[in-house]
Image (spheres, rainbow, N blue to C red):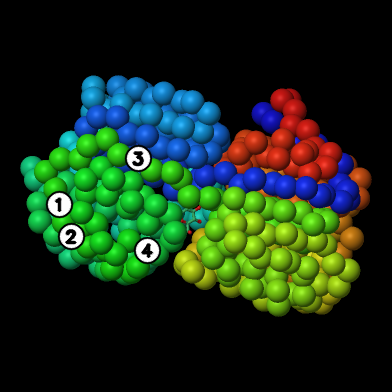
Amino acid sequence: MKQMIIEGNNTLTGKIKIGGAKNSAVALIPASILASGISQIDNVPNISDRDALIDILNILNCNVDIKGDQLKIDTTNLRNTSIDEKYSKKLRASYYFMGALLGKEKYVEMCIPGGCNIGARPIDIHIDGFKALGAKVKIENNKYILQADKLIGTDIYLRFQSVGATINLMFASVLAEGKTVIHNAAKEAEIENIANFLISMGANIEGAGTDKIIITGVKELYGGKITVLPDRIEAGTYIILGALVGKNLCINNIIPKHIESLTSKLIDMDSDITINEDNIVISKVDHLKPTNIKTLVYPGFPTDIGQPMSVLLTQANGTSLFEETIWENRMGHVPSLNKMGANITVKNMSAMIIGPSKLHGCEVIATDLRGGAALVLAGLTATGTTIVNDVEHILRGYENIETKLRNVGAKIEIKEI
Ligand code: EPZ
């Protein structure tokens, strides 16, 4: 088990370079098996979710060559075998092997996926879509078995704009016969990035990034090439850090348009923020105005930035509301924040946050990835020492967090215990 020790209340200054987006990379890696040959993915973040997916590729007899942030994935000797719980449970994104293997091999055996404990996380929308394309789906001993003689394009309406289902159904339909139209598709920037990878392999996809995606099946896909787009959630987390303890903290290598829902809130709160073409510079101010945030599907306020943002709301002058609408269980970090001196009352999926609160260091537990990141922000803001336990959650999604923070002046250390 790993523990993070933070000496807080230091002013942070300098540059933090944002890496490739976790939520794009975790779909691009499984997508490579749709191609016959070698695909190249650049700007892949060095996070534990990446390694968990590479383990699955190895089980499928694919060869992965890692050079820095570049992956070369050779699927020439792909062997379609069952993906056991030991591998599938490590992360949510293991479910992208369902769509990819179904599309390529028309047969998948995979145990249920894992992921953060932020809600029930059903996959019924994925499964309904696979069935609409012609797959038969059975669940036996916690294992999904998906099989199709052939997949035939059709109109699929998603009852919710699910990110994962939109991506999985693109994977299952790129090699299907005829045309598939995904209606009410998720519009996240990552989806366009993933579609561009498939297009580089020879797929025919129109409309990715809008709520109607049209896929015309092709017979075969060949090795493709893509650069992972910058991680808007990692960027958002460090921008909030700048508002908490920054002095001209520069978050660079980003696409500011992808986080406008956050930056517009920071402007409303009267923060000191300058938005440039590919970076944002932000400093702490003495009086932040309170605000209300409600998480929504893209381009609304991202659910993955709600928990880090709740830390900033503890420092605003007055009462703010944080309402989560996507996941039922996004308040796991609140008991720890209150232990550190915050004044937060949770009712169902909403939190009332009264600020400003003086935060003080103590021992806390990361219950999930973004909740854990919120505790790191709180620890860097608090006086004294904060010990964050179960840091593995955070390392799933934040590349080199210790080094990135140390480079801007944070006193932070990760220890094995
Ligand atoms: C992706 O999860 C991200 N994960 C999540 O990021 C992110 O919070 C989420 O999208 C929303 O933006 C990855 O990309 C790996 P959804 P995903 O399907 O695809 C319900 C992080 O911290 N739903 O859009 O699993 C579901 O319960 C993570 O980086 C169904 O009911 O999210 C939820 O309420 C955590 N049935 C809502 O839809 C389904 O079949 C949104 O889920 C699928 C989803």
Q: Do the residues labelled 4 and 3 touch (CB within 8 Å)?
A: no
Mark carried by residue 225: 3
Q: Mark 4 sits on what residue?
A: 209
Q: Position of residue 255 (x, y in %)?
A: 55, 58
User: Residues under labels 4 and 1: Cα distance?
Assistant: 19 Å
Q: Determine crowd level at label 2: few under 14, some 14-19, many 20+ residues with C-alpha closer than 10 A.
A: many
Q: In the drawing, does residue 6 fall left or right of residue 189?
A: right
First of labels 4, 1 by sequence position = 4
Whether residue 364 is visible, yes or no, is no
Residue 217's disc number: 1
Residue type (three-letter) at the residue carrying disc 1 = Gly
- Whether residues under marks 4 and 1 lie with C-beta atoms below 8 angstroms apart, the answer is no
Q: Do the residues under discs 4 and 2 have CB atoms within 8 angstroms?
A: no
Label 4 is placed on what type of residue? Gly
Q: Residue at x 46, y 32 (%)?
A: 70
Circle 3 or circle 2, nearest the eye? 3
Element assignment for label 3: strand
In the rendered structure, which disc, 4 or 3, sits on the residue that comes first in sequence? 4
**Could you tell me how far apart the alpha carbons at marks 1 and 2 are, in whole angstroms?**
8 Å
Q: What element carries label 1?
A: loop
| Pair 1/3: label in front | 3
Q: Please give the name of the residue rendered at 21% of the width and 45% of the height, measured from the top-left corner.
A: 202
Q: Mark 2 points at which residue?
A: 180
